[in-house]
Image: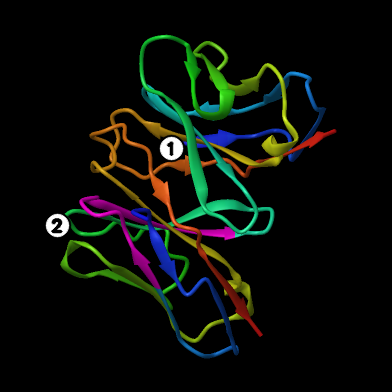
Amino acid sequence: GAGVSQSPSNKVTEKGKDVELRCDPISGHTALYWYRQSLGQGLEFLIYFQGNSAPDKSGLPSDRFSAERTGGSVSTLTIQRTQQEDSAVYLCASSLLPSGTGNQPQHFGDGTRLSIL
Amino acid sequence: AQSVAQPEDQVNVAEGNPLTVKCTYSVSGNPYLFWYVQYPNRGLQFLLKYITGDNLVKGSYGFEAEFNKSQTSFHLKKPSALVSDSALYFCAVRDLGGNTPLVFGKGTRLSVIA
């Protein structure tokens, strides 16, 4: 289909390891967002890419978290030296217009379920 | 700062009865408001949005929501609930004049009982 694709769907790793999560947005979507969903905590905003502008990293919880978006398309979220509290579902979304200047809804992938042992 | 409150963690309703899932918001300017639904092990699916115009917004799967500016609310409603409506529902808001991602509520789990 033509939706947002995330991989892997599940990831189990040991504490202290680094992990990379991938997001393929809908083709042509200029905005891309990463969220974290923890049990009972709703969605926590992590980072937002808007076209060629500098990303909004204000939601990243620590310097162990980073994200890239190459060529304005695929994005990877990297978590270094994982901790048990990083266990959550990481959701990616994309939208047709930059946030704030348009009213297009965000389209979500099915997420990556990350479990830190 | 923008914020969303969904005061109910859980809503239970009998199949065929009307349902309401509550949402209140806070923004500095005029709001964009959204409702999303999440089924198990899936991402969020867009249901409906309010931008301007009619306060009653109709969306997917027979859902609608009413924008009430004086009460800063945007409650989700459906006249007759289905068992298949059982899911997690999220309200979200963005300031009309801002340049920020959506801010989501903590979600309300809806259970429709046959």
Position of B25 relative to B37 (above/below)? above
Q: Where is residue A20 in the image (x, y as percent from the top left)?
A: 41, 79
Q: Does the magenta stretch include residue A33?
A: yes
Q: Residue at x 63, y 21 (%)?
A: B77
Q: Main secondary structure of the magenta part?
A: strand
Q: Quadrant of residue A16?
A: bottom right
Q: Is residue A70 magenta?
A: no
Q: Position of residue B65 (x, y in %)?
A: 55, 20
Coloration of the structure image: rainbow
Residue identified by numbered label 2: A52
Disc 2 marks a residue whose amino acid type is: Asn
Q: What stretch is highlighted in magenta?
A: A22-37
Q: Where is residue A117 in the image (x, y as percent from the top left)?
A: 66, 85
Q: Is mark 1 on a helix, strand or loop?
A: loop
> Which numbered disc covers residue B45?
none
Residue identified by numbered label 1: B1
Pair 2/1: label in front: 2
Q: Which residue is drawn at 42% across and 42% down?
A: B102
* Residue B63 visible from this viewpoint: no
> As drawn, is A37 to the left or to the right of A5?
right
> As drawn, is B6 to the left or to the right of B30?
right
